[in-house]
Each structure stands twice: as C-alpha cells, then as structure tokens.
Amino acid sequence: MTAQTAQQGDLVTVIGLEVHVQLETDTKIFCGCSTEPSDEPNDNVCPVCLGLPGALPVVNEGAVEAAVKIGKAIDADIPEETRFHRKNYYYPDLPKNFQITQYDEPICQDGTLEIAVEGERRTVAIERAHLEEDPGSLQHVGGGGGIDSAEYTLVDYNRAGTPLMEIVTAPDFRSPSEVRAFLAELEEVLEYLGVFDAERDGSLRIDANLSIIPENEIDGDDTDAIGMDALEAANRTEVKNISSHKGAEKALAYEETRQKNAIQRGRAVEQETRHWDESRGITVSMRSKEEEKDYRYFEEADLPPLRVSGWKDEIAIPELPAARRERFQAEYGLSEEAASKLTSTKQVADFYEDVAGEFDPDLAATWVADNLLGELNYRDIEITAIEGRLEEIKRLVELVADDEITAKNARETVLRSMLDDGRMPDEVVKEDGLGKTGEDEVKQAVVEAIDENPDAVGDYESGDDGAINFLVGQVMQKTGGSADPGDVNQLLRRELEG
C-alpha cells in the first residue's frame, strides 16, 4: 500500500496489528457451554473449558464456517487442511496453562483488505487469520481498578473457550489514523458477514506492535519497502488492552510520541509488552516481550486435522460494504459520502434499499442517512434498537413523498416524537395538527403577512431580496408551520410582483 509517513525528524513509524474477534456462535469453540453473557461469574463453564483432566475438545462447526466466511471476505487462501496447536504460557485466566490455537497452518493465509484514508484507497496485507479459544477475563478490584494498581484480581471463566479469530496484519501502517481506518472497515466487513456482534463487551480487542525506524534504513524512497533487517533490528513494543477504533488511535499516538521522544534523547526503546490505560491515556509497562520460541508450540493431540475441502465452496458470503458502496453510487446516483453513510452497517443499507425501492432514491437517502441516522446518533442509539419500527419510518417518508406533511415538520416534530414518545407517525400528525394547510388558507396567510408588514414589503420592493425570508416566516407562523416554505416563497413573490 502507499502509506503516509509519520515522521518526526528522520523517524518512520511502523505498526502491525493482531485483532482478536469473538465469533458469534451459540456455544463455545470446543464444548457445548453457552457464549451468552452471564451476570454470574463462572456460570457458563464445564470440564472442557475449565481444562480439567480427561476432558476432550470437539470443534464447533459454526466457528469454522465463520472463519471460512472471513477468509473469503479478505480474499485469503484457505487450505484444504489445517491443524490446531497448543500455545503454552501461564496466565490466571487460562486454566489449562495452554491455549488451543493455530500455529504454522492457519485456516486463512495471505489475505488483503482495502481501506480509505483521507480519500485515498490503500491495501493492507493480512498475513494470517486463525481460530483459537478466548481465555477467561480478569476483574481488577481496588486501587483505582488498573492492572498496575489493583488491590487484588478476580477471575471469571465464563469467557474461556469463546471462539476467537485472530487476524494478523503485515506491518503496513505508518500512522495511528491508518489503524483506525482499517479497524472501522474490518468491523463493517465482520458485521456484514453476520459473524460478529459489536455490541458485546470485549468482542473486538486489539494488540498493536509499534516500532520506530530511522528513515535511512528504508529501502529507497518508499516507506513501504522497509527491509526485514531493519524491522528485526528495531525494538518494538506490543500495546495490549485496546478495545475500540478510537482507543487504538489514541494508544498508538501516545506510544509513537513516547518512543520518538526516547530515541531523540538518546535512550533505548525497550522491547516489551505495555498496557493501554484508557482512563489515564497512557501506556504502562507490563512485562518483557515474549518471543515465538517462548510459547513452545506443539500440535494439539486431542484434535485431528481440520479439513474444509469441498464444504468451503458451499459457504456463501453476502455483498460486502465496499462493493455495496460502489453499487449505491452507480445504481442510485449517490455521492461517495452518502453511500458510505448508507452502508455503515448492513441493517442501514438494507433499510435504505427498502425505502429507495418505493420512493425517490435521493429522498430515501436524505431520510435514512441524514434525518434518521442523525437523530439516532444524537440519542446514541443503533438502528438495530428500532428494527421493529422501520415500517413506521417508511410511513413517515410516505407522508412527505405524498405531500401530506412538510419535510420540516416531519423531521423536527414527527420523527422526534416517534423516537422520544413511541407514537405512530399518523398519530403525531393528527394530534399535533401537522397536516399541510390548504392552498386557500395559505393564500389568505400570505395576504395578511403582506398587509401587516409594510416595512418588509418596502425593503423587498427596494431590492432587498432577503426581506422575503422574514415574510415567509410570518406566513409559517400563521399556518402553524404546516405550509411548505418553498410554496410560500413563490406565492409571496407572485403576490408582491403583482
């Protein structure tokens, strides 16, 4: 990809990501325990996900299907056969003291994802994406609740065994803003595939590796062409505990500045794992950075090789966000900005197409992208929260399209009342008297506004075209806002010009 250079003097930032995505399945990856969140700690557990002696894992078919969908979406190679391995390390939320994962034979290899950064399309290389099990979760108690300050830590194994897809990128990013753009696009793709629930706590977690490399160690003038020797020689930090696009950008911006300041002061950057403390906006040292050999990978003896030959060809994926954006522009004549808004989630895109199938595509775009999403964003509500009321929104668009209500009243009164009070659109129109005023009533209001405001009339006749807006406002007042402002403007001009 053609990347931006995040430079401070002659230093270049190099970032690679490990994105851990919880797959949306009913049960865990190697057992039948529910993946539904529980208020009670250590409730959804069994001998398999607790790693008790003699308990044997069985692979969840739904998790494998989700992994294949992701592989197809990122245009990755999906081998006919893949294997599981044991990654050995001790941590309190890993009851077996090893994690079942995939090592040198992952289910997805050599993929790509195209992103847009500042209007420029770029391609990020995805080295691998593999299946594994999630560890449990830790609850740090007391002392501010931070990992470095808590009085004690509790362990909840409910999450242990939840299927994870770890997506590992090449070190293709040169700035934190590029990372944020990638994560936003990736989350859209995952949501379209139906394999991921962004609303679930901890459903997407990011580990980011960041290095600072002197520009003179880059091959030529291309900041993408960083040689392996330069990458291996640079000490990198791994930043953990990042759980959002914005958090990733903030954490990496802090770490980028920290490392560059250290280098410019002649201090060495330690190769280590650091924790992102979101409340303080800083990274703190956790431990020295492990190397691959420290994990002592070996093949998981309790699971046979995983073969997806034949079956993988039967697994279909839907139209993805990038393709849908392009189609919306071509088919509906939308701008790139409008198409991006309308494909931000599959639910939004589906609803837009439903509305555009019955009404003018531009009117549908205005109502879905601007009016509806604007009001939902203001209330911090997702469109999924009103999924059962989308037919009511369509009825409101119909009232506007059929000229039974002004767009202003529909937007500022009816829609807001629907969202705030739960009323039906026709109910709001009737009870609030928002039906359009008849033509005779509007004409009478125009005559009265002209008679009652001779100064504004004189200004208009003297060439002050802006005076017409005052008169329009007077007519709208008289009609309770139920007249169309455009129609009122034309009637006033016709009346004033004789």
Image (spheres, rainbow, N blue to C red):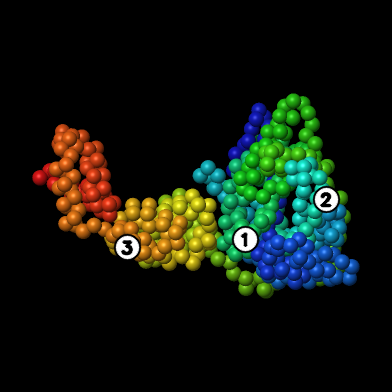
Q: Report the residue marked by disc 1.
A: 197
**Distance between mark 1 and mark 3 Cα atoms:** 39 Å
| Mark whose residue sits in front, 1 or 3 | 3
The image shows residue 120 at horizontal and vertical percentages of 53, 45
Q: Which residue is mark 2?
A: 292
- Element at label 1: loop
User: Of helix, strand and loop, which one carries label 2?
Assistant: helix
Kindly identify which residue carries mark 3.
430
State which quadrant residue 76 falls in. Answer: bottom right
Indicate whether 309 appears above or below 70: below
- Count residues near mark 2 (Cα–Cα under 10 Å), then give few for <14, some for 14-19, many for 20+: few
Asked whether disc 1 touches disc 3, contact meaning CB atoms under 8 Å apart, the reply is: no
Res. 284 visible in picture: yes
Q: CA distance from mark 2 to mark 3?
A: 69 Å
* Residue 13 visible within the image: no
User: What amino acid type should be assigned to the residue bearing mark 2?
Assistant: Glu
Q: Residues within 10 Å of mark 3 (few under 14, many from 20)?
A: few
Direction from residue 112 to residue 43 in the image, left or right: right
The amino acid marked with disc number 1 is: Asp
